[in-house]
Structure formats: C-alpha cells, structure tokens
C-alpha cells in the first residue's frame, strides 16, 4: 500500500444502507411488467387501424352510391363500367348544343373531380333557383343539370364556361331579332346577351351569355319537351346567378376541369 493513501471500508455499513433503501421505497407500488401491456396496446392499435380502413372504404362506396356514379378501376379481373355518352341536348329540348368533355373510368382523378363538382353545382343552383324545384346532375356532363318541380314539370339547366371568349361575347348578333336577343349590363358593367327561345304563348327557354375570367359563360333554363306555360324563372333570376360570386367561381372551375378532362 502506498504511503499516504487512505482506504475506506464500507462492508460494515452495507446492511444499514440496504435497510435505508428498503425503507425509502417501502410505500411504493411494486413495479409493473410492461411487456403484457405493450402487447395489448399493439393489438388495440392494429384493430383500430383495420376499423378505420374499413370505414373509409364504406364511406367512399356510400358517396358513389348517393351520387349515382360508380367507378371500377381497371384490373385483370375487373369489369370496367363504361359511362353513358354525354348528350348535350335531350330530344325535344330547344337551345344550342353545349359540348362538354366526359370523364371516363380510366381517369380516376377526373372522374372523382367531376362527381364532386357536379354535386356542388347542383346544390348551388337548387339554392339560387328555388322556383325550378329540386336540381340534380345528369349523367357525367358537368355542364348539364335537371330540375323537377312539385307538379312534376321538368326543366334543363345549362351551367357552363368555355375558354372561347371574343369581343362579341355578351352581344347580340346582327342576324338576331329583338324578340330573340336583347343586351343588358350586369351590375359590374359586364355586357350580357339574353336569348329567348320562343314557345307558343311564352318562352320555352332563357339563357344569359357573358364573359368572365377569360371564359364565355352561359346560364340557361329550357323547358322539357312537352312542358307548357311560362318558365318558373325570368331574366332577373338568371342574371342573379350570373352575378353570384360562388357561381362565377364554379364556372371558372368547370372550364378548367373540362380542359383537364379533354387532355
């Protein structure tokens, strides 16, 4: 042993130290085995994940059922449901043809966007044109909608915008008569052409055409084939739709969506 080094021996103090430690933890609960709890927690989390996945699938299926549009992704054993051809005008309906691209099951993204877009447009038109009754979408066409009143009178609504605006948008052509086309200005000064489709004693159709955001926008209502009597909407109703900001944003969105579906 090196001179000057002090060595301390604690052997005699070990029992006292142990008793002190036992006294300090004497009131605590015994330690818990963490392994069973961790296994149980893991099983619960896996069960919740499976439930959430199943719930999401049910929600998607329910949405497709409510909107009346089904989508089956192509695969080795899958049967792809072909969408109905887009009909811009139904037999007997007056008014010009509006050509709108149709989303196909082969393009899942445009299909989902079209379903969502058509639902939002139908809801807005139902709110802005209450005289027409319940508004619903038709087929896959994002520009054509149908309304049914309580008396079962049917009407077709055109709600579209195309990037084909020119200097004459919102103006009546020289060949159009004053009975079929008149011009007015919207509240923001935008010129709009109001075109009337004759139908006996009253108009069978009304449409307002104007330019907005680099598009030619059309809001129109046509009586279904065989319907008689005055339209339940007038020029003021359609111009109110044309001036509604939510409607204008949907018109621009529809023009962009049509281009995306055509590409």
Image (cartoon, helix red, strand yellow):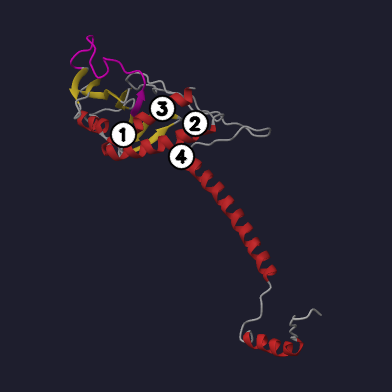
Q: Is residue 172 located in the magenta-colored stretch of the structure?
A: yes
Quadrant into which the N terminus falls: bottom right
* Mark 1 element type: helix
Q: Earlier in the sequence, mark 1 or mark 4?
A: 4
Dot 2, how many residues are within 10 Å of its Cα: few (below 14), some (14-19), or many (20+)? some
**Which residue in the protein does label 1 denote?**
247
Q: Earlier in the sequence, mark 1 or mark 3?
A: 1
**Which residue in the protein does label 3 denote?**
256
Dot 1, how many residues are within 10 Å of its Cα: few (below 14), some (14-19), or many (20+)? many
Q: Earlier in the sequence, mark 4 or mark 3?
A: 4
Q: Residue furthest front?
A: 3
Q: Which of the two marks, 1 or 4, is nearer to us in this view? A: 1
Q: Is residue 102 above or below residue 3?
A: above
* Mark 4 element type: helix
Image location of residue 231, percent across then percent down: 24, 30
**Which residue in the protein does label 4 denote?**
67
Relative depth, front residue between 167 and 184: 167
Q: CA distance from mark 3 to mark 2?
A: 11 Å
Question: What residue span does the magenta drawing correspond to?
Answer: 157-179
**Which residue in the protein does label 2 denote?**
110
Q: Is residue 13 located in the magenta-colored stretch of the structure?
A: no
């Amino acid at each position: 042993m090196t001179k000057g080094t002090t060595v301390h021996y604690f052997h005699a103090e070990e029992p006292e130290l142990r008793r002190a430690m036992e006294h300090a933890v004497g009131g605590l609960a015994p330690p818990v085995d963490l392994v069973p709890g961790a296994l149980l927690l893991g099983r619960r989390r896996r069960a919740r994940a499976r439930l959430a996945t199943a719930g999401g699938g049910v929600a998607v299926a329910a949405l497709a059922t409510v909107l009346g549009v089904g989508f089956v992704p192509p695969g080795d054993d899958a049967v792809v449901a072909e969408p109905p051809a887009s009909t811009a005008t139904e037999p007997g309906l007056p008014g010009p043809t509006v050509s709108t691209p149709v989303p196909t099951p082969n393009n899942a993204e445009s299909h989902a966007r079209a379903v969502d877009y058509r639902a939002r447009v139908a809801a807005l038109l139902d709110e802005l044109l209450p005289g027409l009754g319940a508004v619903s979408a038709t087929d896959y066409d994002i520009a054509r909608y149908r309304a049914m009143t309580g008396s079962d009178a049917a009407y077709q609504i055109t709600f579209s915008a195309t990037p084909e605006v020119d200097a004459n948008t919102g103006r009546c052509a020289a060949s159009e008569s004053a009975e079929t086309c008149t011009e007015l200005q919207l509240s923001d000064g935008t010129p709009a052409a109001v075109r009337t489709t004759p139908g006996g004693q009253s108009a069978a159709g009304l449409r307002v055409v104007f330019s907005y955001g680099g598009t030619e926008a059309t809001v129109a209502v046509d009586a279904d084939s065989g319907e008689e009597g005055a339209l339940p909407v007038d020029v003021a109703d359609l111009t109110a739709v044309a001036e509604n900001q939510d409607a204008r944003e949907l018109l621009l969105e529809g023009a962009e969506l049509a281009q995306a579906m055509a590409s």
